[in-house]
Image (cartoon, rainbow, N blue to C red):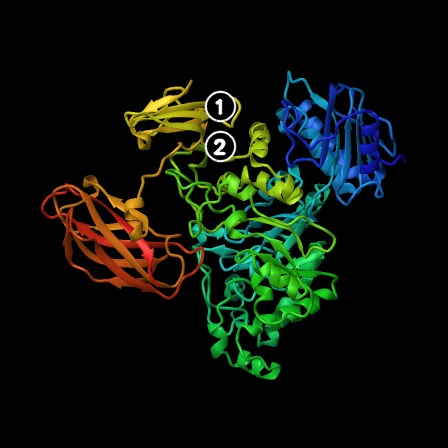
């Protein structure tokens, strides 16, 4: 077989006088993630009506995948030529020619050839090829009157890092197997290769275990029978999804959480916990204090049984044990755990987690599996066997992993948690708020060192948690999200940021350029449309804002969505698909009153461009959390309720400042209550009156039971007995 190594291809290009460049955006070539080397040549490849696909036997599954794609979108039924090397499209494998998962793609007017190191590399070559065709190639319905042409290119490509992952939380919200397969498809489209399958959490057990049927009979369902929520995957479902993923180069890594986040198992089998108390499966997210009892032999046997069935279902070389957010209070009073500590010479209850990790690591070593877990697994006691830590909280813990003989995957919540919204603007998805928003640019900018054979950081991973916004919430502003399904929410939050995650994982950091990425991304919205993906349309981009002499502002806008129009208002009102069309710079008297949105159709449009009010004059009082206007104010005692999730950042002392700003009537303030979900955390009794010009009213309270990702809200009694002509604001700050 002819060798197509990178060195040989580059030599050929040099002899031909062709300048080799990195992939630069053109009108027709906008591949994501960016290939290592790309040359665009003259001419196009026209997909023949009578199409033939030749392929090596080892690439049969990938060839059949390509045949299916062409059949459903183009109507062309390819003739398959197994073991042949001549055809309109040729798929060849040469393990010596490329890095693992690498490929060379050659598109000429006569044919297409993909030479890959392995089946995954061949699949990635196919994905680059599909991105060269019109966007309709991704449709599952026959698209007529399309010229199925691809520009002629020469591409040599391979990933920078071996781990390019996403985590999908199916435990807090159950997604059926068809949605999971679609999620795998979308990952594979952008050459991501690991799906961490978060199967277990306090609010749901999603994996059928034959030896313990109550795990799914009881632990998979919450709420009354007639309205119960949940579901689970049968073992046949798992086998189907694993096989589906394998064709697409995606490895399903199961996550079985312990010692915390396992209440769903404790509900089914109370003897697994330290207390043996019977619980109910929660219908809302919270972190249970009940842990798997480390001191009981029966608990260890349970883990061994569960993990043995799990590894039989998942051929992955890894198994994820979770291990995050354990609170060890139960261990302090558990006689079994205390006895174990004494036997093992442990001095802190947290060291019991390290002990358990070692026990399970030994179990899985016999099964040729490497443990993965959240960073806590290497921070809670000494772990002897090499493991892989998912660094989600403190990136510096990756250094600790290296020093202690472990590897790491970077998935910091600051950049890689896609359950946070992209922006903090009105109408945004009611997603996680315990950290600031993660914009597309921030996600793309995540720093990670270039990879080498000696690297202990083996890759990056995005995370999508399903606990913050599920079960019937409505978003009136976004029509296709205004329904009682979380699948669309999941897609809205994941895309297009998953494309940024894919390029962070695939490319060297030194080659990343956000403006270039954004340009290439613009051609992918239509591709996501044809995949029927409910992605988030970006808001219009401010190219220039010019301050005028009279204090007005002159805005120049641009849309990153081809085919979209920009609609705008200048009076502070919410724009609609029927608002005036932006055709050039707009002058507005007050910048805060300018709104603009991208509109693709009457049912598909973005949130509005939004300029947050300037609260800098109040920065000494903390972050804005609530404001009242006359229409909100009653003349009789009433309660104001507002969210402070994300503003509450940990245990400690807080102050809420209440400041009237307009109006000639005083506001009377009463008791404040701080709630964590439905649990009262603090109460401050007050009976004071404030009006414009007075010193702020200050509520001071303490919190000692903070949980990351947990919703918090405040209720305050407030009214204006002498008339409602009063407006004001409230600010929250942590003082200790």
Q: Quadrant of residue 149?
A: top right
Q: Residue furthest front?
A: 549
Report the residue marked by disc 1: 564
Q: Is residue 46 visible?
A: no
Q: Is residue 313 above or below residue 99?
A: below
Give the Cα distance between marks 1 and 2.
10 Å
* Residue shown at 78% from the left, 34% from the top: 104
Q: Is residue 389 above or below residue 165?
A: below
- Could you tell me residue 160's position as x and y percent? 70, 45
Name the mark on residue 342. none
Question: How busy is the neighbourhood of tag 1: few (under 14 within 10 Å), some, or many (20 plus)?
Answer: some
- Could you tell me residue 348's position as x and y percent? 53, 77
Element under disc 1: loop
Report the residue marked by disc 2: 537
Question: How busy is the neighbourhood of tag 2: few (under 14 within 10 Å), some, or many (20 plus)?
Answer: many
- Please tell me which residue lies in front, 648 or 429: 648
* Residue shown at 52% from the left, 39% from the top: 441
Quarter of the image for the C terminus: give it: bottom left
Q: Is residue 600 left or right of residue 316?
A: left
- Please tell me which residue lies in front, 634 or 404: 404
Q: Quadrant of residue 16?
A: top right
Q: Are marks 1 and 2 in contact (CB under 8 Å)?
A: yes
Q: Residue furthest top?
A: 145
- Could you tell me residue 421's position as x and y percent? 46, 43
The number of numbered discs placed on residues in the rendered structure image is 2
Quarter of the image for the N terminus: give it: top right
Element under disc 2: loop
- Could you tell me residue 251's position as x and y percent? 68, 49
* Residue shown at 74% from the left, 22% from the top: 41
Upstream in sequence: badge 1 or badge 2: 2
Q: Is residue 178 left or right of residue 49?
A: left
């Amino acid at each position: 077989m002819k060798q197509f190594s990178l060195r040989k291809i580059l030599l050929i290009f040099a002899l031909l006088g062709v300048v080799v460049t990195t992939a630069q955006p053109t009108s027709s070539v906008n591949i994501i993630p960016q290939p290592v080397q790309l040359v665009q040549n003259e001419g196009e490849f026209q997909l023949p009506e009578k199409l033939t696909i030749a392929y090596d036997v080892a690439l049969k599954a990938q060839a059949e995948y390509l045949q299916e794609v062409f059949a459903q979108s183009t109507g062309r039924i390819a003739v398959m030529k197994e073991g042949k090397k001549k055809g309109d499209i040729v798929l060849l494998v040469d393990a010596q020619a490329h890095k693992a998962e690498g490929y060379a793609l050659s598109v000429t007017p006569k044919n297409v050839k993909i030479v890959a190191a392995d089946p995954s590399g061949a699949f990635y070559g196919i994905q680059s090829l599909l991105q060269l065709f019109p966007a309709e190639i991704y449709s599952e319905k026959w698209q007529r009157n399309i010229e199925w042409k691809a520009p002629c290119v020469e591409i040599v490509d391979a990933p920078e890092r071996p781990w390019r992952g996403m985590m999908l939380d199916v435990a807090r919200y159950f997604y059926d197997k068809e949605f999971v397969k679609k999620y795998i498809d979308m990952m594979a489209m952008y050459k991501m290769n690991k799906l961490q399958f978060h199967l277990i959490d306090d609010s749901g057990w999603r994996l059928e275990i034959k030896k313990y049927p109550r795990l799914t009979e009881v632990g998979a369902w919450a709420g009354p029978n007639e309205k119960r929520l949940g579901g689970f995957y049968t073992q046949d479902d798992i086998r189907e999804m694993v096989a589906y993923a394998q064709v697409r180069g995606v490895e399903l890594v199961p996550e079985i959480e312990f010692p915390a986040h396992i209440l769903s198992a404790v509900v089914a089998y109370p003897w697994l916990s330290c207390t043996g108390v019977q619980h109910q499966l929660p219908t809302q997210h919270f972190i249970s204090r009940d842990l798997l009892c480390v001191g009981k032999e029966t608990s260890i046997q349970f883990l061994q049984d569960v993990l043995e069935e799990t590894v039989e279902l998942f051929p992955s070389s890894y198994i994820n044990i979770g291990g995050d957010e354990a609170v060890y209070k139960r261990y302090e009073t558990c006689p079994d755990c205390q006895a174990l500590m004494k036997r093992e010479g442990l001095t802190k209850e947290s060291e019991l987690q390290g002990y358990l990790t070692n026990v399970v690591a030994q179990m899985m070593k016999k099964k040729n599996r490497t443990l993965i877990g959240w960073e806590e697994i290497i921070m809670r006691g000494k772990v002897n066997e090499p493991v892989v830590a998912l660094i989600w909280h403190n990136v510096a813990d990756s250094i600790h992993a290296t020093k202690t003989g472990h590897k790491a995957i970077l998935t910091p919540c600051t950049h890689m948690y896609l359950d946070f919204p992209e922006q903090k603007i009105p109408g945004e998805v009611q997603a996680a708020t315990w950290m600031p928003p993660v914009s597309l640019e921030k996600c793309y900018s995540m720093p990670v060192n270039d990879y080498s054979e000696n690297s202990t950081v083996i890759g990056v991973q995005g995370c999508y948690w399903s606990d913050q916004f599920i079960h019937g919430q409505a978003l009136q502003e976004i029509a296709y999200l205004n329904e009682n399904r979380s699948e669309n929410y999941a897609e809205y939050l994941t895309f297009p940021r998953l494309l940024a995650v894919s390029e962070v994982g695939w490319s060297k950091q030194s080659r990343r350029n956000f403006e270039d990425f954004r340009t290439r991304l613009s051609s992918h919205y239509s591709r996501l449309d044809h995949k029927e993906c409910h992605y988030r349309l970006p808001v219009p981009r401010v190219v220039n804002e010019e301050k005028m002499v009279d204090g007005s502002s002159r805005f120049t806008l641009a849309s990153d969505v081809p085919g979209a129009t920009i609609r705008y208002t200048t009076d502070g009102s919410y724009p609609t698909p029927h608002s005036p069309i932006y055709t050039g710079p707009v002058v507005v008297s007050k910048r805060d009153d300018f709104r603009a949105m991208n509109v693709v159709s009457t049912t598909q449009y973005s949130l509005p461009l939004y300029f947050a009010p300037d609260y800098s004059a109040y920065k000494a009082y903390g972050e804005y959390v609530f404001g009242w206007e006359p229409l909100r104010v009653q003349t009789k005692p009433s309660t104001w309720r507002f969210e402070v999730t994300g503003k509450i950042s940990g245990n400690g002392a807080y102050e809420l400042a209440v400041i009237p700003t307009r109006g000639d009537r005083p506001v009377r303030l009463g008791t404040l209550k701080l709630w964590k979900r439905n649990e009262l955390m603090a109460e401050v009794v007050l009976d004071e009156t404030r009006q414009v010009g007075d010193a702020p009213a200050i509520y001071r309270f303490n919190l000692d039971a903070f949980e990351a990702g947990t919703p918090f809200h405040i209720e305050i009694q407030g009214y204006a007995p002498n008339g409602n002509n009063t407006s004001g604001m409230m600010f929250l700050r942590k003082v200790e």
